[in-house]
């Protein structure tokens, strides 16, 4: 079956630090990969996505590259801000009719 | 554009009592999802609707859980009777159609069963 593994958290960084959040997956077929973010008190929202190998998704300064050879989709940002404090979920789906499979999520706290 | 609306935001009940959650998706969104999110875990799909039809309810515990989306717009998820292990956050999401990548999530209902 499909599964997503995220690195253990929480993660605490100082403002302007470099961020990497690891995500690896197991899937049948060729999945589309996603990062969702949940800000405090809000619903999950799509941060970025990649639908095929070597694609790079980007949004709000965040980037993630679909690496088929390592089955990974690590999230990176060069300089985090306090406003990036949130819970980040990696997810995949293997077709239009298939469900989203989420990782456990990781809490990021950015201090001034 | 209004987002996905859920109510109530918080609910505390005693075990064996019934409980219902309501969701109003984004206007024009045909696909509606209910997810269960346990503490420290990612969301897990309970049921997916295409308009008023439940097209994937394989993960819904049908002995105590039920859902409906009678007019293909808003939806209700019910638990009867609730058990201690049902304490979790219940999320509703919607998308324009089944194959669309982006799902829009509501803020969730946090259920505590005592």
Image (spheres, coloured by chain):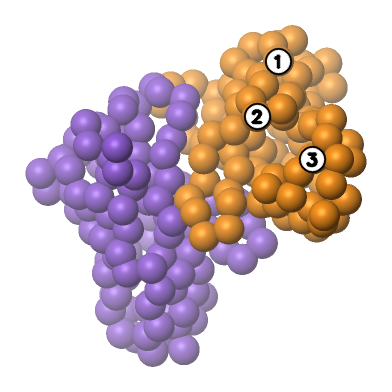
Q: Is residue A66 left or right of residue A19?
A: left
Q: Chain of mark 1?
A: A
Report x, y in % for residue B59. Answer: 43, 50
Tell me if mark 1 has few (under 14), some (14-19) or many (20+) residues whose alpha carbon lies within 10 angstroms of its own.
some
Residue A80: give its label.
3
Q: Is residue A99 left or right of residue B4?
A: right
Q: Is residue A49 left or right of residue B28?
A: right
The answer to whether the residue labelled 3 contacts the one labelled 1, judged by CB atoms less than 8 Å apart, is no
Report x, y in % for residue A75. Answer: 76, 32
The front one of A25 and B72 is B72
Q: Which residue is mark 2?
A: A60
Q: Which residue is mark 1?
A: A56
Q: Chain of mark 3?
A: A
| C-alpha distance separating marks 2 and 1 | 13 Å
Query: Considering only order in the chain, which callout, 1 or 3, is on the residue closer to the N terminus?
Result: 1
Report x, y in % for residue A13. Answer: 87, 51
For label 1, the SS is strand
Q: Which quadrant, please, contains the N terminus of chain B?
A: top left
Q: Chain of mark 2?
A: A
Name chain A's colour.
Answer: orange
The answer to whether the residue labelled 3 contacts the one labelled 2, judged by CB atoms less than 8 Å apart, is no
| C-alpha distance separating marks 3 and 2 | 10 Å
- Which-is-in-front pick, marks 3 and 1? 3
Tell me if mark 2 has few (under 14), some (14-19) or many (20+) residues whose alpha carbon lies within 10 angstroms of its own.
few
Asked if residue B46 can be seen in this view, the reply is no
| In the rendered image, the vertical position of residue B79 relative to residue B90, given as above or below | below
| C-alpha distance separating marks 3 and 1 | 19 Å
Q: Marks 2 and 1: same chain?
A: yes
């Amino acid at each position: 079956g499909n599964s997503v593994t995220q690195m253990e958290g929480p993660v605490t960084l100082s403002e302007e630090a470099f961020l990497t959040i690891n995500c690896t997956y197991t899937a049948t077929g060729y999945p589309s990969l996603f990062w969702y973010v949940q800000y405090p008190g809000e619903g999950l929202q799509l941060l970025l996505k990649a639908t095929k190998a070597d694609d790079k998704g980007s949004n709000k300064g965040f980037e993630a590259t679909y690496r088929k050879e390592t089955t990974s989709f690590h999230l990176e940002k060069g300089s985090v801000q306090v406003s990036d404090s949130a819970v980040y979920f990696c997810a995949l789906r293997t077709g239009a009719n298939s469900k989203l499979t989420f990782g456990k999520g990781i809490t990021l706290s950015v201090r001034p | 554009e209004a987002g996905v609306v859920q109510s109530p935001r918080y609910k505390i009940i005693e075990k064996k009592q019934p409980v219902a959650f309501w969701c109003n998706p984004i206007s024009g969104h045909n696909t509606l999802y209910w997810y269960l999110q346990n503490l420290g875990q990612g969301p897990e799909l309970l049921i997916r609707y295409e308009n008023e039809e439940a097209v994937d309810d394989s993960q819904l515990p049908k002995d105590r859980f039920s859902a409906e989306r009678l007019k293909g717009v808003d939806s209700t998820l019910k638990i009867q009777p609730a058990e201690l292990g049902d304490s979790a956050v219940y999320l509703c999401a919607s998308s324009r159609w089944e194959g669309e990548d982006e799902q829009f999530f509501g803020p969730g209902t946090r259920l505590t069963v005592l």
